[in-house]
């Protein structure tokens, strides 16, 4: 594990997600840019001091030199955004599989470079857009793909949070301070941190690609340099329309991530805070509430259930589903087997799409909220 | 009553709203442009044939000639949009109070002209933006005005319907046919029909005025000339931001009108389909659900309750609340008393604001969805 | 109208329910046992003093003497429970149709006597078990009758309120004072006031008859003589089981009346505070939410809709549905026509069942909460 | 681990719960009464064949003989009910800490015997009444204990499931077959399987002890010998009343476990299927929705949060919370430290209370649903 030391939030989430199914074990780490903090964090986690490294560079070197049977099967990168690219590149080039937190990189240029590295390396690269790990998100995708909604006309996706309603970054809160810093977070504030989740969720479920967008970004909290609120009109290729909202000043909201998708035959609605419910609405018959854990869900969704219906799936299990699926690929890679078919985890391509999204949103906002046409990355 | 004959929908709603509290009685009407249909409708309603008119022009003349004690106290206009202005003007100039369905008129020019007529007439003019009649909408306004939310930063207001997902207008459905016809509906489709409700609700609760907007209008159903879907970014005077969605192709939605308002101290959320609940969200304490019928609501809201808490308020009661409040003004006018203070019903000014909204939305959409600055009507 | 003067609650509800559809008008009343209060209440309601009576006895006499074309078509009784029987009998015997608030009478003996009077009179007698007026309750009944749920196995019906959590009756609150007084309310407290609604709703939807029950009644508030909390196990004829809860000390509850019915094929759930939703649950497919106002509901339900789907039905409309249906019978009676088929309003038989329920519940409670077998009233 | 081999459900849940926080590892097991199945299950779990035992008796012997540093810190018992007592006794007497699935034993006699063994052994014994592991259940307890609700008057607790609505036990479904078999399940069907969860939850949150109860048990499915539906009236010591419902034929229900608790000052409501929400209702102010993950929760609840507010807690995390807390005690025991204060996990005493509950419920039901006074186990 790279990053995720004391004071970090997402590192612990990744650790639980990685071990939940008894398929992996934490054996090495470089948990902080500060070597002492790294050592202390390793000790907290009952790790051998020998494999608690002072830096990820040291770690890459040392681990690459290990005999095959002791070598890491994969590394997990849970650092702030500006420190995704370099360790990912380093470990991929040293022949390690990589699981990285999102967004993919600091900017689009890095993202495209990393894409090339991944392709060249032939290693597995998974990006933890964790919300697509929920069973009912997978079922939503299945319903769309099976044609149940007909042709998609409209997507409304919102990710409102309220935790940055005040100037939390000046209080020493570690999560806030790097997220509002353009040098560590990149060009997007709320857009990068959670807007990319919204973009990814819409894309995962519908398969639609953004054609152009018009973004109104605001920094409501005085002195904040990155956006803390984003309202975006979207036009998808093929004619569907969308509204995408990401906000970290929507006071009182926790992680009220939700999506509504309207086709010409039916619609669906899903809320991350109540993830076991997927509502399907029809023009001419009663609404349905599809629930996780049921046999009636399609195989591509229900194979991710761990417990029977009525036992709520949590955030950590959804996160672990990303890991579980990536492990199917990683095991094959490690054992030299052919990759299983029907893999379902976010990859470097999703990451590139996310960086492209951020770049275009910021471009629109900086141009006076004009419409910006997406250019395809080559 | 002008309009509201056989086959109409909103006429019956107005009739129930008007009589619910035992304060008024239907005594005369011109229910249709077709004299026979008007007579038949009058008979349906047990009206005297003598006061069932062949046209509203005839009605205005005949009723104006009545002795004071038999004269109408007010007329209700429930015709399609293109027939709001002329009867309203006619009856106002003949010294009748007027209650009119929304939007105010066919276009902004008519609206401004009507505003002048109202001012000159010194008669009461009420516009049935009925959703502001709900008790918890009134409580929402009270909470905002009392400063509970702090400075408003963001408003998300949506009015999704699905009933025009297919080309209903070609089936002879009367409600659909005039609403999609630019000659009867005006320049806005979904924007005029329900977008104005959204604009009015946001304005009613927050008091914010739109400064500029960027609108993406779509006609999803083939052959339809007016928009059936509207996604609009809004900037309010003073710095607040907004997203306004109106849609009649959001398949499976009934009247899922809802609003979320975020201040710098707290937020609120209200859904028209579950109108007795008003959710207030805080950064640092449990969410609250305020409910209609309770003594803890403020006087400006709870004076509209008819039944105790837990007995749901319906659409018709909210509608009747507009009437009930307008009647307070009309009674005073009729009896030559001073108007009561604290009147709470939509007026011609709300109507002008609505027409200004439609005009600017359409202007933005036609300009390639550019931002349009509101000009103040003089 | 008998009763319902100043300070009363349910009188106003009946008046709105009666006039909402423009089918009736209040023309006479004896609003209070206190002649002055009766006169004052009549004046409040803009009634002619000549038809505002000092007592219901006077009223019955005077109105019976009126010429046919001015005579009342029906009277409405909205007095406390101990004053239901006598005026009902009086007016029925004077050939008036009667609409009465529930419960039917003060005790079972009165109820049975009244049943005989009704039968002999051949007049219409309607009892306002208003909750069965909701459209989705009617749809629930239709679903059960159509066999959608299969054989009913279990019914859980609850009516929790909190308004009598404290000793409100000592504060002069009129509603509380008669309800907790055995001389005016009868043998049941919460059981009579709201338990009968629960019994009636279960019976209305399922058609099941209670075979035996075991009741635990409590008076939680010190000094209160009637039960303010009732927990009852029920066995229905045919083998279904039930739990019936009525409580007026369930603090914080408003009118959280709800029912769940389990068959061997499907189940349904309905909540009075959110009356437009009817949830149907299946063993092997997604839950459904049936909503009022939709064409997919059965005729026996949707003929009671006044507004389109998504415009919430309120308590008053449900109440008015009882009136609307009773009016179909009353109009026929008045005009000497044959009664329409498919009438759907509660009658004296429902009232007798309710009194039988109260009597048996109290009997069980007084016997140390033993099981009590229902005897059939002859 | 004892039990939990191929085809079992709850074994996998325990394994995830045990390892989620990186504090324990599965190293040995006797997974089935069938030695071959045990071996196969051990292999599935990547366990060393040397520590995959043919029986738990063999396992106890072999593990007890291990050197201290390799010895198990605790064993987990996840067998059907009739196989809880013997292995628990065996391992406790061999000086192992034990974590056991509920109910505690096959009958009350075993339960009391086991209680003695636990006391004598001075080992840690934890019983996985997992629903008390949810953060908001802990917060509910804190609210009750802090007096926020005042004196508790009424408890309504329901655990409806629908999965045994049909005769599933004849299809070879392993979960169903032992649960409906009196030889393996004990005297209670739904009462033992889920009724004990309901009893435990009510007791955990309120601290109330049952004084007497009256139970109506039914076997709705033909040929089933144990109850599949239980409706129980409860009187608590001190005067509070209760209704407890457990059902496995409530068709369409998944695990709709919920509780409502009414005090004389406020009430609370919690639903297992939406576990992050805890609703508090007051007589005179807005309802509150307390949510997991927030700083405003009390320490005794929020110390169990793993992720920030708005990221839903799942069934597995709640289950893991029982483990996490038991581990605090087990670590202390293993290291010879003093047990930490404020331990919060179910113990043998909860298990005895559960068996006492089952025994009395069945006794009441068999006596024709008479009231049964609880006798205290000595």
Image (cartoon, coloured by chain):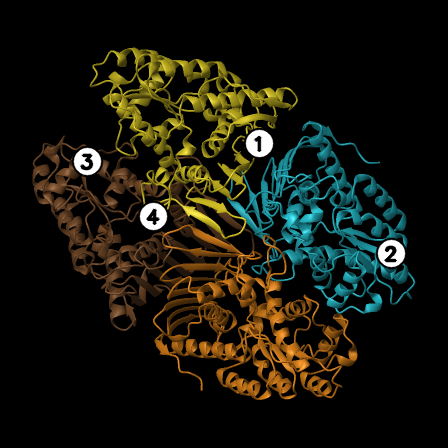
Chain colours: A cyan, B yellow, C brown, D orange
The chain under label 1 reads: B
- Chain under label 3? C
Q: CA distance from mark 3 to mark 4?
A: 31 Å
Please give the residue where the numbered disc 3 appears in the rendered image. C44
Q: Earlier in the sequence, mark 3 or mark 4?
A: 3
Mark 2 sits on what residue?
A57
Tell me which corner region of the image, top left, top right, bottom left or bottom right, holds residue C171: bottom left
Residue D277 lies, in percent from the top left, at 52, 56
Question: For the residues marked 1 and 2, what is the alpha-carbon distance in whole angstroms?
Answer: 47 Å
Nearer to us: label 3 or label 4: 3
Q: Quadrant of the N terminus of chain B?
A: top left
Label 3 and label 1: CA atoms lie apart by 50 Å
* Secondary element at image label 3: helix
Q: Are marks 2 and 4 on the same chain?
A: no
Provide the residue designation for mark 4.
C132
* A236 displayed left or right of C115: right
User: Is residue C304 among what the camera can see?
Assistant: no
Q: Which mark is residue B239?
A: 1
Label 1 sits on a secondary structure element that is loop
Q: Which mark is residue D120?
A: none
């Amino acid at each position: 594990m790279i990053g995720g030391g004391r004071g970090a939030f997402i590192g612990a989430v990744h650790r639980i997600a990685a071990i939940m199914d008894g398929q992996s074990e934490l054996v090495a780490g470089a948990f902080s840019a500060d070597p002492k903090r790294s050592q202390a964090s390793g000790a907290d986690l009952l790790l051998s001091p020998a494999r608690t490294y002072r830096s990820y560079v040291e770690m890459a070197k040392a681990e690459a030199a290990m005999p095959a049977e002791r070598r890491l099967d994969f590394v997990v990168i849970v650092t702030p955004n500006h420190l995704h690219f370099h360790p990912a590149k380093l470990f991929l080039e040293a022949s390690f599989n990589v699981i990285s937190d999102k967004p993919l990189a600091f900017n689009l240029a890095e993202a495209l470079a990393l894409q090339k590295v991944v392709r060249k390396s032939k290693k597995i690269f998974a990006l933890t857009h964790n919300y697509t790990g929920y069973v009912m998100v997978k079922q939503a995708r299945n319903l769309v793909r099976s044609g149940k909604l007909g042709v998609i006309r409209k997507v409304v996706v919102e990710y409102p949070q309220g935790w940055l309603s005040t100037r939390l970054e000046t209080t020493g809160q570690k999560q806030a301070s790097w997220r509002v810093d353009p040098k560590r977070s990149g060009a997007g504030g709320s857009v990068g941190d959670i807007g990319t989740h919204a973009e990814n969720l819409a894309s995962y479920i519908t398969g639609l690609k953004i054609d152009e967008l018009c973004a109104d970004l605001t920094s409501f909290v005085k002195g904040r340099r990155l956006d803390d609120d984003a309202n975006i009109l979207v036009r998808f290729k093929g004619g569907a329309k969308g509204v995408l909202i990401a906000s970290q000043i929507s006071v009182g909201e926790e992680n009220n991530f939700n999506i509504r998708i309207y086709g010409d035959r039916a619609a669906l609605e899903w809320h991350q805070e109540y993830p076991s419910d997927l509502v399907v609405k029809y023009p001419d018959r009663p609404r349905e509430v599809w629930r996780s854990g049921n046999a009636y869900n399609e195989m591509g969704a229900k194979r991710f259930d761990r417990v029977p219906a009525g036992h709520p799936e949590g955030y950590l299990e959804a996160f672990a589903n990303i890991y579980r699926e990536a492990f199917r690929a990683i095991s094959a890679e490690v054992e030299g087997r052919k990759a299983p078919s029907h893999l379902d985890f976010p990859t470097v391509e999703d990451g590139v799409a996310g960086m492209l999204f951020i770049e275009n949103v910021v471009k629109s906002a900086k141009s006076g909220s004009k419409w910006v046409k997406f250019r395809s990355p080559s």
